[in-house]
Amino acid sequence: MPTSVGLYTSPHLRFVRERIQTNNRPISEELFAKTFWELWDRLESTAPAATPDEPEARNIGGKPVYFHYLTLMALHCYMQEKVGTAVIECGIGGEYDTTNILSKPSVTGITSLGIDHEALLGDTIESIAWHKSGIFKEGVPAFTVPQPEKALEVLRQRAEEKGTGLNVVPVQEGLDVNLGIQGDVQWTNASLAIAVCSSHLSRLGFTGIPQPSDGAAKLPDEFVRGLEQATLAGRCDMRQDSKLNNLTWYVDGGHTLESIDMAGRWFASASAKQNDQGDAVRILIFNQQTRDASSLARRLHTTLATALKDDRPFSHAIFCTNTTYASSGYKADLVSINTNKDDIGSLRVQRELANTYDEIDPGARVHVLGTIEEAVARAREIAGESGKKVEVMATGSLHLVGGVIEVLESEQERARL
């Protein structure tokens, strides 16, 4: 039987079990519950007393906070299930991230850096690079992709301090592969994945593996198949609507200036391939509850206006909260506590976004709605009335993206029952 592979990522989109996967599938509800209670019981048996420095509110009865608990659950699950290899994604940063309890991984990798989580990581690319490079370990191969020079300088210094060398991976030459995950940035990500996997498999003793530093090496069939079959919901994710033949969804959680720029360029490219006549009605569904929403919306408009050669990239702009359903509110797995309830109730952010978009494009029709379910319904109303191809781009927040996917996929699941 092939060795199993674990994958730990965050955040989840529809349900929390997505974070802990084996062989490309979320673990079962039964295994999730079993792992949860095994860890809970072990922590219960060793719970420390609350102190002034660590009050009980900070660690409930000695239990770690949410992300920390899930990280321990993932590692416990992989050990109990005897997973052969585990791919572990950091949560925020690296130096102080919970995943850094892994003291001797086989290889480490850092993707393209951008400014994000400024309250924790700082507001300069050098500070971000310092935190991210906290995953480097003595004697453990470290890889990254081309970065801004200031960031690379920090990464190299940190690699030297930690007793390893930094390998900067160029984009693979002549990569004749139909990548399963779309978007120009994925060629960079694929090249890093090839190098990291090559290093890991070589350290495990496999032969016939390309050298990690050889950007022109011929890839084994297994590598090609993996790149072509890779999927990641909510990232450069295009899907046909289940109810309307003329409606296509483009879903990507661009939540930083860099990532929303990438998302916009992907949408423009994918739209051009799908819409030869160039006369599709384009709709934006957008939210960003905790970052600078207006700056993100402006960047997206600028990117698309340039890429599409159209000063009015969207005829409709829908701004909604991350609340999933009109009648029942959030699906339990989709609750984000990093929000202000008063802001959500008053639609403050959404109304500000509407005003911003009126300034950006006075010709677009702007809609402010309370839930994702209503936003999906409004997009379908517009599509049903248009008589043309309709393309909806949902972006700005992974919580929004998760809610959109929840609404679309839960409809399909109910239809199959």
Image: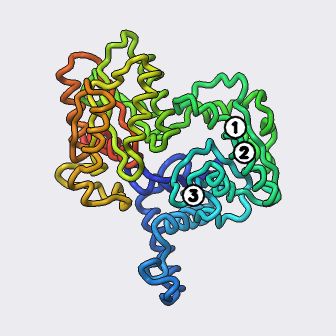
Looking at the image, how many numbered discs can be counted on the residues? 3
Q: How is the image coloured?
A: rainbow
Specify few, some or many for label 2: CA neighbours under 10 Å numbering under 14, 14-19, or 20 or more. many
Q: Earlier in the sequence, mark 3 or mark 2?
A: 3
Measured from the top left, where is residue 104 in percent x and y? 74, 62
Measured from the top left, where is residue 347 in percent x and y? 23, 50
The quarter of the image holding the C terminus is top left
Disc number placed over residue 152 in the picture, else none: 2
Q: Is residue 71 above or below residue 280?
A: below
Q: Which residue is mark 1?
A: 146
Q: Are marks 1 and 2 in contact (CB under 8 Å)?
A: yes
Q: Nearer the viewer, residue 220 or 341?
A: 341
User: Which residue appears farthest toward the front when viewing the image?
Assistant: 359
Judged from the image, the secondary structure of the residue bearing numbered disc 2 is helix
Q: Is residue 116 above or below residue 409?
A: below
For residue 250, side relative to residue 380 (left or right):
right
